Image (tube, rainbow, N blue to C red):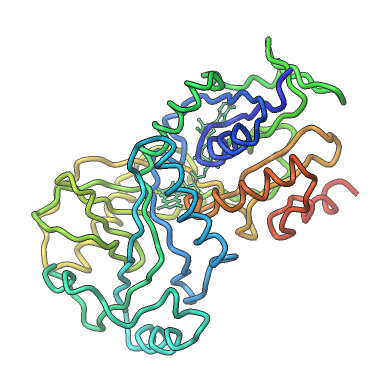
């Protein structure tokens, strides 16, 4: 009998699987390799600053430190390069945002993140930049297709990856064991991203998924090492292409890329650049597992002591997964308390009492 069945091999499930194996646990990871998985569309950017109100994200300092450590170590274990610390250059949209930035960057709490200046290379781009720009330090980029394919390869080598779509009618749960087809385990952890809405054990949780679209365009010959942001990201993918993302849609939650989404991204480029000859090479859509209070969904099912969830990474899976998975492993293995903001206990009272 294995220790854990993990369902869903996106960023959440794969990182958790990696950590549990490292702790000597026996697992299987069931993943249906859905073409719509959020990680297949995601930009791979991490930014600990929320630009809307110019505030640090929840647990920004701890998560940033853990993310740098985790991806750096994992690169060495997997022998593949997929991670880079990156600066994020924010174009100011008006005098107010400019002033706010300058004030905030003097705050010692923000000095590790906000810089008034911007890299020289920004001047080489044909940008409309009437209010100037500032830089977020301490951000990062994970090349998700390389990261996820090498991590999955590693999990395949450990013989833990099972390609299957979990069929709930074949799952049986008792106090002592979890049985799924011919797999037997002591515990099960669900990590299906937005698909958790179809999970009979956890569909009561307030997941409020958001659709996002991204495009890849031909690089007109520019070269820059930072990520450019003015509401959306633009980055040099270093292979003759630029990545642009992402849109937010709360109502039409299908997985189809739309003209509306593409046009919104192109309009962003038109607004910010004195250039218009964009050539779209690729266009994708995915659904982010976002939560009403924007915190993760981790913990144990109120009625089953061996049924767990690790989800709700929202718009920031790359930043949150390393830190939160570490907390989840300590919770699973040692019974350590999860951070209360990310523990599903916060919703249990409303649904089970
Ligand atoms: C357009 C867009 C841009 C984004 N950009 C960024 C970004 O720049 N930086 C960032 O940090 N985040 C970004 N995100 C968010 C990021 O993608 C998510 O935070 C992250 O992917 C969540 O990871 P997850 O593993 O929970 O879910 P997912 O990545 O969706 O993975 C879920 C996995 O579960 C599997 N699965 C589901 N149901 C089943 C089942 N029944 N049986 C078996 N397997 C199943 C799926 O195949 C998939 O592999 C973006 C998202 C979108 C849509």
Percent x, y of residue 347: 77, 53
Between residues 82 and 291, which one lies in front from this camera angle?
82
From the viewer's perspective, is 335 left or right of 196? right
Quarter placement of the N terminus: top right
Q: Furthest-top residue in view?
A: 182
Residue in the foreground of this view, choosing between 273 and 331: 331
- Seen from the viewer's position, the closer of residues 124 and 325 is 325
How many labels sit on residues? 0
Outermost right residue: 353
Q: Position of residue 263 (x, y in %)?
A: 27, 53
Residue 197 lies, in percent from the top left, at 63, 38
Does residue 325 appear to the left or right of 240 in the view shown?
Answer: right
Q: In the figure, 335 relative to 145: above or below?
A: below
59 and 192: which one is in front? 59
Task: Name the residue located 64 percent from the left edge and 19 percent from the top edge.
Answer: 167
Left or right of residue 330: residue 43: left
Residue 174 vertical position relative to residue 61 in the rendered view, above or below: above
- 139 on left or right of 70: left
Residue at the spot 60% in from the left edge and 32% down from the top edge: 21
Residue located at (80% from left, 32% from top):
306
Q: Which residue shows up at 66% across the image and 25% down it?
A: 26
* Residue 245, position as x, y percentages in the image: 33, 54
Residue 301: image quadrant is top right
């Amino acid at each position: 009998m294995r220790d854990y069945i993990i369902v869903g091999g996106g960023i959440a499930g794969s990182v958790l699987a990696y950590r549990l194996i490292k702790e000597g646990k026996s697992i299987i990871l069931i993943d249906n390799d859905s073409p719509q998985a959020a990680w297949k569309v995601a930009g791979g950017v991490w930014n600990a600053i929320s630009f809307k109100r110019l505030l640090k994200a929840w647990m920004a300092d701890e998560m940033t430190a853990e993310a740098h450590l985790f991806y750096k170590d994992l690169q060495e274990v997997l022998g593949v390069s997929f991670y880079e610390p990156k600066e994020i250059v924010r174009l100011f949209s008006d005098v107010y945002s400019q002033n706010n930035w300058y004030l905030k960057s003097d705050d010692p709490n923000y000095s590790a993140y906000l810089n008034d200046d911007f890299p020289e290379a920004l001047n080489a781009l044909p940008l409309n930049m009437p209010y100037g720009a500032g830089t977020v330090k301490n951000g990062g980029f994970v090349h998700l297709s390389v990261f996820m394919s090498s991590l999955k390869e590693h999990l395949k080598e450990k013989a833990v990856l099972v390609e299957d779509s979990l069929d709930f009618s074949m799952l049986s749960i008792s106090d002592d064991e979890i049985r799924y087809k011919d797999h037997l385990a002591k515990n099960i952890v669900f990590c299906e991203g937005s698909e958790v809405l179809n999970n009979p054990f956890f569909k009561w949780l307030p997941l409020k998924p958001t659709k996002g679209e991204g495009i890849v365009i031909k690089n007109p010959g520019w070269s820059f090492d930072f990520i450019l942001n003015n509401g959306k990201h633009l980055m040099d993918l270093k292979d003759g292409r630029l990545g642009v993302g992402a849109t937010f849609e709360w109502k039409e939650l299908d997985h189809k890329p739309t003209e509306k989404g593409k046009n919104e991204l192109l309009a962003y480029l038109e607004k910010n650049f004195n250039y218009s000859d964009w050539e779209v090479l690729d266009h994708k859509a995915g659904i982010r597992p976002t939560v009403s209070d924007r915190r993760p969904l981790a913990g144990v099912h109120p009625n089953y002591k061996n049924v767990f969830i690790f989800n709700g990474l929202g718009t920031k899976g790359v930043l949150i997964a390393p830190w939160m998975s570490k907390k989840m492993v300590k919770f699973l293995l040692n019974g350590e308390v999860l951070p209360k903001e990310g523990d599903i206990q916060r919703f249990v009272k409303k649904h089970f009492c």
